[in-house]
Amino acid sequence: FYALDSNSAITTKSSVVRCIGNMLNYISPDQLSPEEYSDVMERGARALISNITSGKSMKVRWNACYASSNLLKKEDVTEDTGKWVLDLVNSLTSLIQNFQNFKVRINAAVALGAVWSR
């Protein structure tokens, strides 16, 4: 995964971001080696974080929040999973507190509400 470049069309970017969240939700640890699973989860989460924090389009940020919700509702995603979990939660929290678009703020709050365990 990589942070999507700014030359991508907004619609494509939004779809890709949602796809990343869906894929991370459906992939399970028994499908890959532990190292591969950890790497895929971290790289996918970092791509979401990048689009949450610096997406130029509200639609991309909204979809990144939606995708984060899919990721955070996994049972095996806890604060012990990796540093990326805390980074993702912090980026969503920052959106809720500081972002001007209320649709994005609401979806960031929904994503935080999807956390499986606290």
Image (cartoon, rainbow, N blue to C red):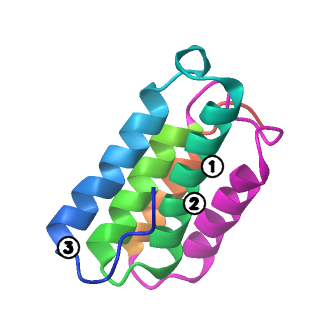
Using the image as rendered, state which of residue 46 and residue 60 is in the foreground: 46
Could you say where residue 60 lies in the image, as x and y percent from the top left?
A: 32, 69
Question: Residue at coordinates 37% horizontally, 38% vertically from top-left?
Answer: 22
Quadrant of the snapshot with the N terminus: bottom left
Is there a contact, CB below 8 Å, between mark 1 and mark 2?
yes
Give the Cα separation between the discs numbered 1 and 2: 6 Å
Q: Is residue 83 magenta?
A: yes
Amino acid type of the residue tagged 2 in the rendering: Arg
Is residue 114 visible from the viewing direction of this image? no
Q: Nearer the viewer, mark 2 or mark 3?
A: 2
Q: Which residue is mark 2?
A: 46
Hey, which quadrant is residue 61 in on the image?
bottom left
Could you say where residue 90 lies in the image, as x and y percent from the top left?
A: 70, 65
Q: Secondary structure at mark 1?
A: helix
Using the image as rendered, state which of residue 49 and residue 118 is in the foreground: 49
**Numbered tag placed on residue 42 in the rendering:** 1
Using the image as rendered, state which of residue 21 and residue 105 is in the foreground: 21
Could you say where residue 8 lies in the image, as x and y percent from the top left?
A: 22, 75
**Is residue 115 found left or right of 99 in the rendered image?**
right
Q: Secondary structure at mark 2?
A: helix
Question: Residue at coordinates 31% horizontally, 45% vertically from top-left?
Answer: 19
Hey, which quadrant is residue 23 in on the image?
top left
Q: What is the magenta range?
A: 73-101
**Numbered tag placed on residue 10 in the rendering:** 3
